[in-house]
Amino acid sequence: MRIGIVAPSSMVPPVEFQLGIEQLRQAGFELQIHQQCHKSHLFFAGTDEARAAAFFEYAHDPKLEALWCARGGYGAIRILPLLEELTRRKGIPPKNLLVGYSDATALLEFVSDRWGWSVLHAPMPGIRSFCTQTALEWETLMGFVRGTRVEKMPWGNKRLRFVGKKPKHAIEGLLAGGNLTVWTMLSGTPFAPRVNGKILFFEDVTEGLYRLDRMIQQLALSGGFDGVRAVVLGNFDGCTDYPPNVLARKSANPRERERMLLQPKPKDLHPLRKRLNADRLIPQLFGEICDKLGIPVAYGLPVGHGPGHASLPLQVPYRLGTDGQFKRLKRNPLTS
């Protein structure tokens, strides 16, 4: 199987990338690595034009059976208008598979919606976690990429937990989503996802809790949950609470008071409040909004930046049972 590797977002770290490429080759893949993967411009892997051109070139290459993003970071949203223009001028590339996650969320949604491609939310060879997947995670990733039958999802018999009341009936729908930050950035743009009748999946990394809440509120206010059947939450690795530090006391000395205001020392400060528990609060933040909209929220899927790195096919049908079982369906619930 011949796979094309492109870097549509941030610069690619050479050592991690080499290790990931070696692992793919050991698995039997023939790799075609675009020279653009080694470029740099600001914090991107080349200019917007270079990254868009490389992506579109490989998308049209008939010898490639899949495209795999080298890594995430930031930058994919900048090339969406360029890809739209290239598509208008040169036509839709033949159907294929795109693999990636994190910043690649924008591209997974784009190629699925605009080109009708298959998309796989999965680790990328330019990040360290690619080489630290468990045996089951790697086995299912290989099955998804090769298109062979995957009998068991990477999370096995793990049941998801619901925020608040469990739904009265099982929920079926196409699964969409990815990185919450990137997904929110698409809202209000010409590339805003269509979510009606779908199950939404979200994950994120190193975001403050208040920033997550801000994004959830923005999605709700902009119609990003309209018509959604359920929300499933994956990993939110490194997402924590950051209570601000404030002055612990007021000095009676005018000079010391001025110094404390301008250049406070650590001993002059203390947290404004207790640190909130992220594991408990993140599901609650989604639950508060989705409860008002009548949308069930389930959490605990080991997908995202960590600690679990399970691969997840998107834009295919899934079933969320009342017992928390989450599995891929062989039929499309929208047409059956």
Image (tube, rainbow, N blue to C red):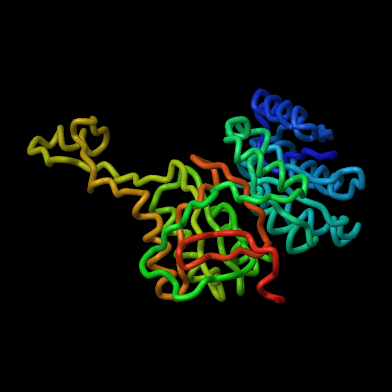
- Give the vertical position of 285 relative to 238 (above or below): below
Whether 131 is drawn above or below 307: the answer is above
* Residue 217, percent from left and from top: 45, 65
Q: Residue at x 15, y 33 (%)?
A: 255
Left or right: 131 in relation to 261: right
Who is closer to the viewer here, 112 or 229?
229
**Quadrant of the rendered structure where residue 261 is?**
top left
x, y percentage for residue 14? Answer: 68, 25
* Extreme-left residue of the structure: 252
Q: Can residue 123 be seen in the rendering of this structure?
A: yes
Residue 213: name its quadrant. bottom left
Give how far across and how far down residue 52 sits, in percent.
Answer: 78, 47
Q: Is residue 161 left or right of residue 70?
A: left
Near-viewer residue (23 or 49): 23
Q: Nearer the viewer, residue 160 or 52?
A: 160
Residue at (77%, 43%) from the top-left corner?
Answer: 51
Q: Residue at x 46, y 57 (%)?
A: 160
Asked if residue 192 can be seen in this view, the reply is: no
Q: Residue at x 35, y 55 (%)?
A: 281
Pick the residue in front: 107 or 312: 312
Disc count in the image? 0
Classify residue 182 as left or right of residue 49.
Answer: left
Assign the C terminus to one quadrant of the image.
Answer: bottom right
Question: Considering the image in quadrants, where does the N terminus appear?
Answer: top right
Above/below status of 175 relative to 143:
below
Q: Quadrant of residue 18?
A: top right
Query: Where residue 19 sits in the image (x, y, percent)?
Result: 68, 25
